[in-house]
Amino acid sequence: MSVIGEEHVRGGMFKDINADDEDAQPTEIDSLCMNCYENGKTRLLLTQIPFFKEIIISSFTCSHCHWTNTEIQSAGRIQEHGISYTLKIKSKEDMNREVVKTDSATIRIPELDFEIPAFTQKASLSTIEGLLDRAVAGLEQDQPIRQATDPEVAHKIDQFIQRLKKLKDVEEEFTLIIDDPSGNSFIENPFAPQKDQALSVSHYKRTPEQNIALGIQECEPDEGEKPANDLETMRNEVLVFNTNCPECNVPASTNMKLVQIPHFKEVIIMATNCDSCGHRTNEVKSGGATEELGTRISLHLTEPSDMSRDLLKSETCSVLIPELEFELGMAALGGKFTTLEGLLKDIKDLIVTKNPFICGDSSTTDTAEKLEAFGKKIDKIMAGEMDVHIILDDPAGNSYLQNIYAPDPDPEMKIEKYTRTFEQNEDLGLNDMKTEGYGETEH
């Protein structure tokens, strides 16, 4: 831990840091060492995790006592949903996966019945091997005291430490679970843009207790205000409400409109424009309930005109392109109301254009070539030069792809309804949802 002098803040010694700057250098700040109370150096760097988000890396070094400390902080806001990663570790290569762990994340290894609770460790940017080393160091820290005061407990902890160290050799498969209510933790997918078969990612709605732990104050409705239930008024009116820009946190306005999609259902479109930094974002929410059955829409692209088809991708919808062995998980791009071409452009921007690991010192030749080749294939699809299928798989049944032959069937489009699995219902929060007798008092 270090303390940054207030005079450096007032004196303007901070320089702007930007994750998109390829030549960005760390910002150096004089700060107090909490180990020897002399002045040390703190270096700050804003960087970007591929297929994830921006983070701030903070590194402190004291030249007097040679004490060092490294931490990370999320440069974004707390996400709308929590996130849980489950990774099956099968080889030593898996130990080199990069991991972002925030303060609010809980780490579990079920095979050892081992858990690192939330808010007991500082945020870190490490590898899976680094997480295990950090856990071992934490357990070894007070062992000399335990050996003197309680040798039996110290012996049991020594045995457990040896079991943790053996995990690094990966003699047997084990499972690593990272559960983060803030949604800001991350485990690397080395096979991107393809799906990682060993890694499963799920998003969930936070509980009130988790919101309180994250410092989110839930707003209570004003008793004097009654919600407007006039849907006809909402259809003909653009509602405006105050919010903060997700990029610079300056107060901004969000416009909301209820729109009827022909041959489908109503959706809510929200758009935010920031006058301060120029950031623009739009999001689509389903205006109806979760359907009884999930929906899988498969379209065979046969001509360039297919790119102009309207498309609604809900935040619970996955996008698959089997010919490219590509799968975009739910919530990766949020909800969108766009065209098929617009969706493919967004996928290319996410995987290729805005990926900082293609350029700079962090790039590798194999990764850059693989991602550039993927971007060229997306271009061919948009130009109608590649025969592929686009599949929208939405367990909530709230996604849509325009049928240009409506109301007649589309010969190149297949729509399937299917029963959700228990895991899909769990991801949607339906297993614990009480829809009957919820107003009754339990005795």
Image (spheres, helix red, strand yellow):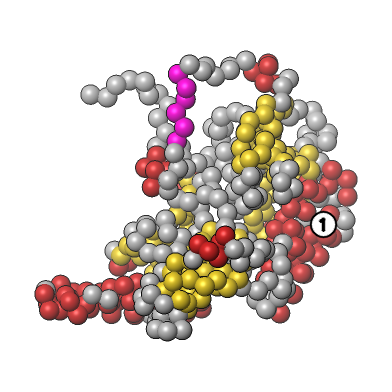
Residue corresponding to mark 1: 381
Asked if residue 386 is positioned above or below residue 333 in the image, the reply reads below
Using residue 214 as the reference point, say whether residue 354 is left or right of it. Answer: right
SS category of the residue bearing label 1: helix
| Quadrant of the snapshot with the C terminus | top left
The stretch in magenta equals 218-223
Predominant secondary structure, magenta span:
loop
Residue nearest the viewer, comparing 415 with 372: 372
Judging depth in this view, the residue of 188 and 148 nearest the camera is 148
Q: Nearer the viewer, residue 241 or 293?
A: 241
Q: Quadrant of residue 322?
A: bottom right
Q: Is residue 74 visible?
A: yes
Quadrant containing the N terminus is bottom left
Q: Position of residue 302 (x, y in %)?
A: 85, 50
Residue 408 is covered by the magenta coloring: no
Please give the name of the residue rendered at 59% of the width and 49% of the height, measured from the top-left corner.
330
Residue drawn at x 44%, y 71% is 32
Give left or right: position of 372 versus 425.
right
Magenta stretch containing residue 222, yes or no?
Answer: yes
Identified at 50% across, 52% down, the residue is: 183
Q: Amino acid at mark 1?
A: Ile
- Residue 55 visible in the current orientation: no
User: At which x and y percent is residue 311?
Assistant: 74, 40
What percent of the width, then of the height, locates residue 181? 45, 50
Neighbours of disc 1 within 10 Å: few (<14), some (14-19), many (20+): many
**Relative horizontal placement of residue 107, taking residue 400 as reference (left or right):** left
Q: Quick check: 382 above or below 232?
A: below
| Front one among 167 and 291 | 167
Residue ID at (51%, 76%):
41
